[in-house]
Image: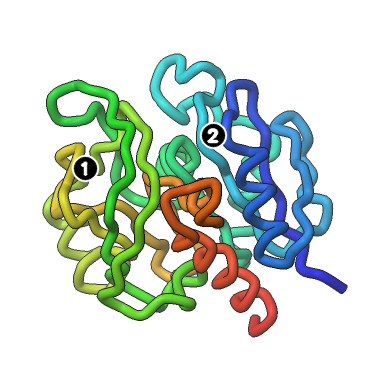
């Protein structure tokens, strides 16, 4: 039986279809999850995709964390289910308390939309085991509020515990310590601002470097 990966759709989600496509390319079965349903449909992992959930009203991800499906995601994550938040999904995971820190307006207050190089800072998370530490991957970034910030204490903790998963090679948004993606303490929950689902095939993206993130999750499910 194939691994089943849920992809949530909120009002305003833009990248749920591409996330589902990435799951399919990795060899798993994508399962559509609706924001208003408190039901994960028996999936093995969950992706919270990018976009503008609930129009980014109040604050990015602030409303989405109250969606019925997110209560189930939080419970499943606390039991060890792999969860990935991409861009707005990263913001949602921070708002929901699954990841520390916050994503704020980019330095210079400009929307950044370009292909960027990331360093794989850790290959220990459930979503990065297919990479060698220190490897460079090329993926798109498209966000206006992608600047990762946290207290020095939290930043030191993330670095000391090896929970910085991805770093910007050329920091495009002013994120503290060049942080592009982080993980939970157990490494099962990961959030990142760039979009690996848009880099799964060289024909349609700048590279296929992002596919390793989705393949890593399949490995995590099979070895759990």
Rendering coords of residue 146 (x, y %):
30, 36
Determine whether, in the image, residue 142 is placed left or right of residue 117.
right
Determine whether, in the image, residue 122 is placed left or right of residue 9.
left
Mark seen at residue 65: 2
Q: Place residue 64 in its image quadrant.
A: top right
Q: Place residue 33 in its image quadrant.
A: top right
Residue 163 in the image: above or below residue 61: below
Rendering coords of residue 170 (x, y %):
16, 50
Residue in the foreground of this view, choosing between 152 and 143: 143
Determine whether, in the image, residue 116 is placed left or right of residue 77.
left
Mark seen at residue 23: none
Looking at the rendering, in which quadrant would you find the N terminus? bottom right
Q: Hey, which residue is sitting farthest bottom in the picture?
A: 223
Residue in the foreground of this view, choosing between 159 and 115: 115
Residue in the foreground of this view, choosing between 6 and 115: 115
* Secondary structure state at the residue bearing disc 2: helix
Q: Residue at x 50, y 24 (%)?
A: 52
Looking at the rendering, in which quadrant would you find the C terminus? bottom right
Residue at image mark 1: 149
Q: CA distance from mark 1 to mark 2?
A: 19 Å
Q: Residue at x 41, y 76 (%)?
A: 131
Q: Residue at x 28, y 24 (%)?
A: 111
Residue 200 in the image: above or below residue 49: below
């Amino acid at each position: 039986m194939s691994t089943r990966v849920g992809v949530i759709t909120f009002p305003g989600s833009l990248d749920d279809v591409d996330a589902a496509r990435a799951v399919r390319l990795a060899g798993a079965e994508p399962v559509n999850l609706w924001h208003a349903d408190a039901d994960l449909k028996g999936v093995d992992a969950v992706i919270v995709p990018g976009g503008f959930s609930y129009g980014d009203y109040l604050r990015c991800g602030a409303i989405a964390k109250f969606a019925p499906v997110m209560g189930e995601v939080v419970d499943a994550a606390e039991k060890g289910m792999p969860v990935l938040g991409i861009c707005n999904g990263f913001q949602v995971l921070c708002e929901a308390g699954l990841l520390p820190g916050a994503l704020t307006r980019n330095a210079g207050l400009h929307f950044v939309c370009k292909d960027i190089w990331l360093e794989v800072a850790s290959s220990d998370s459930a979503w990065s085991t297919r990479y060698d530490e220190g490897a460079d991957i090329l993926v798109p970034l498209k966000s206006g509020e992608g600047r990762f910030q946290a207290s020095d204490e939290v930043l030191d903790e993330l670095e000391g515990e090896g929970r910085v998963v991805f770093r910007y090679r050329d920091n495009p948004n002013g994120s503290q310590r060049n942080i592009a993606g982080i993980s939970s303490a157990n490494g099962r929950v990961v959030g990142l601002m760039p979009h690996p689902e848009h880099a799964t095939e060289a024909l349609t993206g700048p590279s296929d470097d992002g596919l390793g993130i989705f393949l890593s999750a399949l490995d995590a499910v099979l070895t759990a």
